[in-house]
Image (cartoon, rainbow, N blue to C red):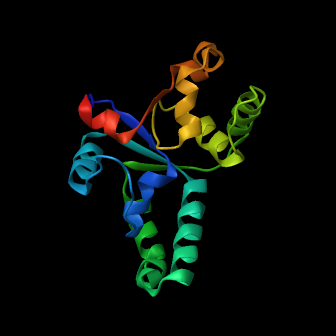
Amino acid sequence: MRLDENSRVFLDTTFILPFFQLDIAVEAFSLKEFKDFLIRATEIHVSELSIFEAKAKIFRLSKKNAAYTYALRSFGENLAMLREDEKIIFHPYTKADDVYFNLISSMNQNLDSFDIIILAQASNIGLLITEDKEILGLRQQEKFKKEPFLGKLLIKRWKELIRT
């Protein structure tokens, strides 16, 4: 996807895992293309919730496989580097997010609470990159597309971004 000079992107949890030394199984994903994409973005938005999810995932993996112990131990250092990057904007859960959470949850979608929080926070950004099937499925739903606030959100899979 061609990013213009005012490109803002919201990353779903899957796409912050590489920052914490975890490989992701995403079709057509390469770290080089991902880095190039992020360099072109003017702002990279991430939910604080995704940080907790990433830590929990690494913790769970390290209990099953010692190979993840280093990623677990260096998580804080990696997080500190992300927080120091002026291009990366972290989203705490706010009152406005809660309003959007309630709006989305009232639409009777097949989304879990984490999906709803990510959507609520990404809606003001304009572009959400996700591999979540339930979130991606919203793109075909008229109810979602016609909602004035949510209908403006562009939801893309990684492979769709690199094709355009």
Q: How many marks?
A: 0
* Viewport quadrant of the N terminus: top left
In depth, the one of 102 and 90 nearer the eye is: 102
> What residue sits 36% from the left and 41% below the top?
158
> What residue sits 77% from the left and 33% below the top?
102
* Viewport quadrant of the C terminus: top left
User: Is 138 situated left or right of 17 in this image?
Assistant: right
Q: Where 110 sits versus 15, above or below?
A: above
> What residue sits 43% from the left and 79% below the top?
74
Kindly give the residue lying farthest to the bottom in the view shown.
Answer: 66
> What residue sits 37% from the left and 62% below the top?
18
* Residue 13 rendering spot, x and y as whole percentages: 51, 53
User: Is 40 situated left or right of 49 in this image?
Assistant: left
User: Is 149 situated left or right of 43 in this image?
Assistant: right
**Residue 106 location, quadrant:** top right
* Residue 157 rendering spot, x and y as whole percentages: 40, 38
User: Is 86 situated left or right of 115 in this image?
Assistant: left
Q: Where 63 sits versus 7, above or below?
A: below
Q: Where 71 sits versus 100, above or below?
A: below
In depth, the one of 96 and 160 nearer the eye is: 160
**Residue 84 location, quadrant:** bottom left
In depth, the one of 43 and 22 nearer the eye is: 22
* Residue 142 rendering spot, x and y as whole percentages: 61, 14
Q: Where 56 sits versus 151, above or below?
A: below
* Residue 124 rendering spot, x and y as whole percentages: 54, 30
**Residue 161 location, quadrant:** top left
